[in-house]
Amino acid sequence: MKNIAIIGAGITGLSSMYYLLTGNQDYRVDIFEKSDRAGGKVKTHIQDGYTIELGPESYLSRKQIMTDLAEEIGLGHTLVRNETGQSYIYTKNQLFPVPMGTMLGVPMEFKALLSTELISWPGKLKASLEYFKDTMPLYKDISVGEFFRHRFGNEVLENMIEPLLSGVYGTNIDQLSLMSTYPNFKKTEQYYGSLMKGLPIERSLKPQAPKKKVGQFYQFSDGLQSFIDRLVEVNIEKGGQINFQADVTDIEKLDDGYRVTVNGESQVYDEVIVTTPHFQYKRWFDDKEFEYFKHMEATSVATVVMAFDQEQVNNSIDGTGFVVSRNMDTVITACTWTNKKWKHSTPSGKALLRAYVGRPGDFIVHEKSDEDIIRLVRKDLDQIMNIEGEPNFSIVTRLPNSMPNYFVGHKRMIDEIQDYVGETYPGLHLIGASHYAVGLPDCVQTAKDTADKILNMSLDF
């Protein structure tokens, strides 16, 4: 029987435990969580009929693994799709619709350029030449900004692409690694010689979407926390041990396994899965090959939720929200019209707004009080929307150092570190958002891959 320790009870740690125990009921699997709750960044707040996400809001429905896991643990019937509606970009001091015929702001056809007011006519002409641009070397990592600036020019990059892409990773687009985040665009460019040539072809090869437009995101009717809570229940039913307020102070490599010290007491495990943010590694590993993690940056962000009576918010737009161009002098980077996007989230007659704060390099999340952040957010919203009076309530949620920065070269460094760990620390697995992907389904996929690796190794003996 294998003894396995998992550090961290976020979605990655809980999913790892689930797949391990589902694959082998004889395993002893312990999770150690420093805080007093499971879920990590995932946290749902229920109040006065509202279901409010304070961390991640949803996940991409096309990433099937999380839906599969939800169905396996009995929550498939609680999945809800977002309402559809136009998304907007705030730039040039006004809201512009995200042009049709784009993918994450990237033009897939000339019509997408011609129809939008986001780009000047000289900018449209420059972008239309993308069809004839030379490609860049396939395996050389470059920044997302450099890649799309070369393909389409600066106007398209800053007014269409950057607002939609950079916010996902909380990283300056001119430092953000293309091969760690959007390698599919590079592969399309390389194969077809042009994105506007290749993207429509690739879209035509995919199964046809349903005629009725449906939302691209999934949520749970009782919030994302219900998924976490159910995963905890199932893991305990399967024999897993989840320990809260359990501070791991040392992980010591032995000849055969690892000694894990928790709250002053030590236990020996055959395998250890570490799912915490990378800045925790220095507590346990003094290895020069992990030096990269000591210097790897992360962006601090916050969400600001404001609840109003519906008549206070004059918003007749058929849309789900907007993202903000970095050219705008605002504190907020985006805002979701939550009551329009998620019908289950808000009682009838109410309006719920969810603004996002925190850009790479600013310190507002660390330096400002909740009251100051709310005031600054409201000032921005009043420039963009027509809102009367004070909210019924507001909630500020700070997520310090929560968005690891994938700078150019990140994937190569992580690949090398993972190879080193596999050779030097057999049985140790460093996984989570700091490595290859930040989305909730990506974390579930990484957890499953790690569990499968451990299970397959057991079969080999």
Image: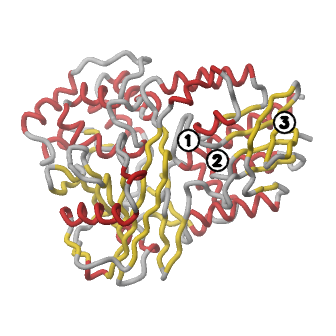
Residue that label 2 marks: 12
Nearer to the camera, 10 or 123:
10
Residue that label 3 marks: 259
Could one spot residue 336 in this view of the protein?
no
Q: In the shown orientation, is residue 42 left or right of residue 451?
A: left
Of marks 1 and 3, the one in the foreground: 3
For marks 3 and 2, give the CA distance.
22 Å
Determine contact: label 1, label 3, CB under 8 Å. Answer: no
Q: Quadrant of residue 446?
A: top right
Numbered disc 3: secondary structure? strand
Amino acid type, residue under disc 2 in the picture: Thr
For marks 1 and 3, give the CA distance.
25 Å
Disc 3 crowd, CA 10 A, few/some/many (<14, 14-19, 20+): many
Q: Tell me how the rendering is colored.
A: secondary structure
Amino acid type, residue under disc 1 in the picture: Ala
Q: Give x and y (percent) for residue 14.
A: 69, 52
Q: Give x and y (percent) for residue 415.
A: 58, 24
Query: In which quadrant will I find the N terminus?
Result: top right
Q: Quadrant of residue 276?
A: top right
Disc with the residue nearer the chain's start (3 vs 2): 2
Of marks 3 and 2, the one in the foreground: 3
For marks 2 and 1, give the CA distance.
9 Å
Amino acid type, residue under disc 3 in the picture: Arg
Q: Give x and y (percent) for residue 341.
A: 38, 66
Residue that label 1 marks: 433
Disc 2 crowd, CA 10 A, few/some/many (<14, 14-19, 20+): many
Residue at point 70%, 37% (across, down):
450
Q: Residue furthest left?
A: 121
Q: Quadrant of residue 125?
A: top left
